[in-house]
Amino acid sequence: MNAEELLERYTSGERHFAGVDLSGVDLNKANLLDINLANANLINANFSYADLINANLSGANLSNANLNCIDLSDANLSNANLSEAHLDGAQLINANFSGANLKEAWLEGADLSGANLSNACLENATLHYADVTDANLSGANLKNGFLSRLVCENTNLTGADLSDADITEASFHKATLIGANLSNTQLHQTGFTNSDLTGANLSGAILEETWFDGSNLSNANLMGARGEPEYGPNTTINLCGEWEDATLCNTVMPDGTIRNDNCPER
């Protein structure tokens, strides 16, 4: 099916196009609200600046598709293949990406507030300046991603894998990172305020000018955390904020010592 046929049928009132082959189609700026493209072949398609609010793209193949500045608010992309897709500046509010493959996808400046990305693969993905306020990323794979200046407020990252990711200057406020893997991450000038990092793994992370004000680090592991390598191997870690405001219960500190500050009485 080509773009002209799809648009003609959509204009006549048809909405169900499940399983169609639209690979390489150009639907730039198309208005396709409520369309059903479940399991469709959309490889290399161009949907930049298109409006697909409340669309059904579950199981669709959007690998390497151009979705820059698209509006997919409230859309269903569960289990879709968006590997290497371009979603820079996209509106993805309350979209469902559960179980989706977003490996090496580009989401710079994307609005993912309220989105469901549980168990999604975002390995090597770019979320620079993205907003995941109120989003669900529990069990998500964000390994080796570029997450600089990511906004995480009330975000659920329980059990997420963020290992080896660049998370510099990111903001985590009231975020849930229980059991999250943050090993070997770059957390330069990153703030964790009133967040739950119970059982989180921060071993080997760069914690230069990182703060944990009001956060819970019970049973967290910070063994081997270090300062910025560019400042030399013997750099002293500069942790901003007051550790006294954080909960440290059976917390392994960078030097291997165990801290028990502000532990609740048992």
Image (cartoon, helix red, strand yellow):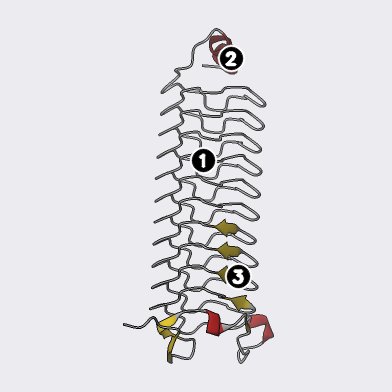
Amino acid at dot 2? Leu
Front residue of 179/128: it is 179
Q: Kindly state the secondary structure of the residue where label 3 is placed.
A: strand
Amino acid at dot 3: Gly
Pick the quarter of the image with the C terminus.
bottom left
Residue closest to the far left: 266
| Residue on which disc 3 sits | 191
CA gap, disc 1 to disc 2? Answer: 26 Å
Residue 7 disc label = 2
Q: Secondary structure at mark 1?
A: loop
Q: Which residue occupies the extreme top position in the image?
A: 12
Distance from label 2 to label 3 (Cα)? Answer: 47 Å
Q: Nearer the viewer, mark 1 or mark 2?
A: 1
Q: Amino acid at mark 1?
A: Asn
> Which residue corresponds to the image point at 54% horizontal and 84% vertical from the top-left?
244
Identify the residue at horizontal 44%, vertical 57% (top origin): 141
4 vs 143, left or right, is right
Residue 263 left/right relative to 195: left
Residue 170 screen position, x and y as percent: 62, 64
Q: CA distance from mark 1 to mark 3?
A: 25 Å
Pointers 1 and 2 in contact (CB under 8 A)? Answer: no
Q: Residue furthest front?
A: 265
Q: Position of residue 122 (x, y in %)?
A: 49, 52
Q: Secondary structure at mark 2?
A: helix
**Mark in front: 2 vs 3:** 3
Q: Earlier in the sequence, mark 2 or mark 3?
A: 2
User: Mark 3, residues whose alpha carbon is within 10 Å: few (<14), some, or many (≥20)?
Assistant: many
Q: Is residue 246 above or below residue 100?
A: below
